[in-house]
Amino acid sequence: MSEKFDVIVVGAGPAGNAAAYTLAKGGLKVLQIERGESPGSKNVQGAILYADALERIIPDFRDDAPLERHIIEQRMWVLSDDAYVGSTYRSAAFDKPPYNRYTIIRAQFDKWFSQKVQEAGALLLCETTVTGLMMDGDRVAGVHTDRGGTVYADLVILGDGVNSLLANKAGFHPELKPRDVALAVKEIHFLPEPTIESRFNVQPEQGVVIEMAGKITQGMVGTGFLYTNRESLTIGVGCLLSDFKANGVPPYQMLEDMKKHPAIAPLLEGGEMKEYCAHLIPEGGYKAVPQVCGHGWLMVGDAAMLVNSVHREGSNLAMTSGRLAAETALELAAAGKPMTARNLAAYRARLEDSFVLKDLKKYQRLPQVFDRNHQFFTDYPDLLNGAAHTLLTVDGVDKKTKEKQVRKNFVTRRSPLGLVGDAFKLWRAFE
């Protein structure tokens, strides 16, 4: 293939689809290249869809997108070995359209999104691997593929995931550090349809999200999750790659142990596991974001390390970055300006001005705090659950004595200086 395009988009995930759709709708000649046999076949996510990010791209997406349930309730759990403490937010406002968040099945959703991209006028090429970037001096002028040879373009947008070999090979992205990447595993369990409603106290279209931390990660930095789909539950857990390497715990075994927790097992009872997959997730935060633009190229989504690990947000950052990259290119094309590094720097400015980098910047210290202080995943889950158990047990012991016992337990596990130090670290990380 020797044809030239205005833009080549590598990858058909949320970031790549958002970029390709926006570019094609804007009238540019777009080629999208996906290595999977179909869009969605290589993509993995929890998966939560954040409506606002997609609505800014496809305003009427709710008319025909394959959505599972709209989220009306969020639970946050900190688990010990056999208990949990947590909080719940359930909102009648979240039960009124237009809904804010949905659960989705990625394979179905990505095919829908890709169809919209093609209807907008982009050319999709699947089962094709981009083997390298075609360089003209220091300018990216196209891509080399394993099918059709070299394809030329004025701009290449890299949306090929966290382990973007293209960016690394070209020197645009440094070698990934294991502490900046998490490995997540998830399963989808199908249950009889009325079961989800009764177990989670919801109506057929309503959904619940449970985010979990604590002993389920076996002392490693990470979190777990459980989402309600229309007929199934998605359950998963992810930890830093560096911790998996140091601890030697297989990810699939961690998930198996997590499913046996007395708070989780009843929710899965009677289900049939139909899907298992694993995925790398960028967790390094603001300080791990690489150079995102250069002479003839832009980087979006996971490839640009754009994931807010604190709030477990990724797809909204991906879609927003894809849209902003496309809007930058459209603006330059309309003005007749070349896709130079200087001109494309407007994309980085757009990211900085959006919630994407503002949120990552706000929490930029947190990844390092957790990486260096594993007591947040070992001592504190036990202490919090132990305190709740002591104070809620009615056994004739007065409450003042119980409060003294709780304080003693905290000091036994963590010195007063350690407690103050940990509180200061968290305060500094969140300020």
Image (cartoon, rainbow, N blue to C red):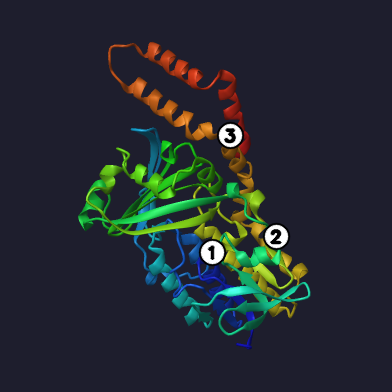
Residue 316 visible in the snapshot: yes
Q: Secondary structure at mark 2?
A: loop
Instruction: Tell me if label 3 and label 2 are in contact, CB under 8 Å.
Output: no
**Residues at marks 1 and 3, CA–CA distance in whole angstroms:** 30 Å
Mark 1 crowdedness (10 Å alpha carbons): few <14, some 14-19, many ≥20: many
Q: Which mark is residue 220?
A: none
Q: Nearer the viewer, mark 2 or mark 1?
A: 2
Please say if 212 is above or below 229.
above
Q: Which residue is mark 1?
A: 319
Crowdedness of circle 2 by 10 Å Cα count: few (<14), some, many (20+)? Answer: some
Find disc 3 in the rendering and name its residue.
426
Foreground pick, 243 / 21: 243
- What's the distance in space between the residues labelled 2 and 1, CA to CA? 18 Å
| Label 1: element kind | helix
Percent x, y for residue 111? 42, 73
x then y, percent, for residue 263: 31, 39
Label 3 element class: helix
Q: Tag 2: residue type? A: Gln
| Amino acid bearing label 1 | Met
User: What count of labels does the image hold?
Assistant: 3
Quadrant of the image containing the N terminus: bottom right
Disc 3 vs disc 2: which is toward the camera? 2
Which corner quadrant of the image does residue 28 belong to? bottom right
Looking at the image, residue 152 sits to the left or right of residue 57; the answer is: right
Quick check: 301 left or right of 394?
Answer: right
Residue type, numbered disc 3? Leu
Whichever of callouts 2 and 1 sits on the residue coming sooner in the sequence is: 2
The image shows residue 159 at horizontal and vertical percentages of 58, 67
Q: Residue at x 45, y 75 (%)?
A: 37
Q: Residue at x 51, y 80 (%)?
A: 124
Image coordinates of residue 362 in percent, x first then y, are 62, 45
Q: Which label is found at residue 291?
A: 2
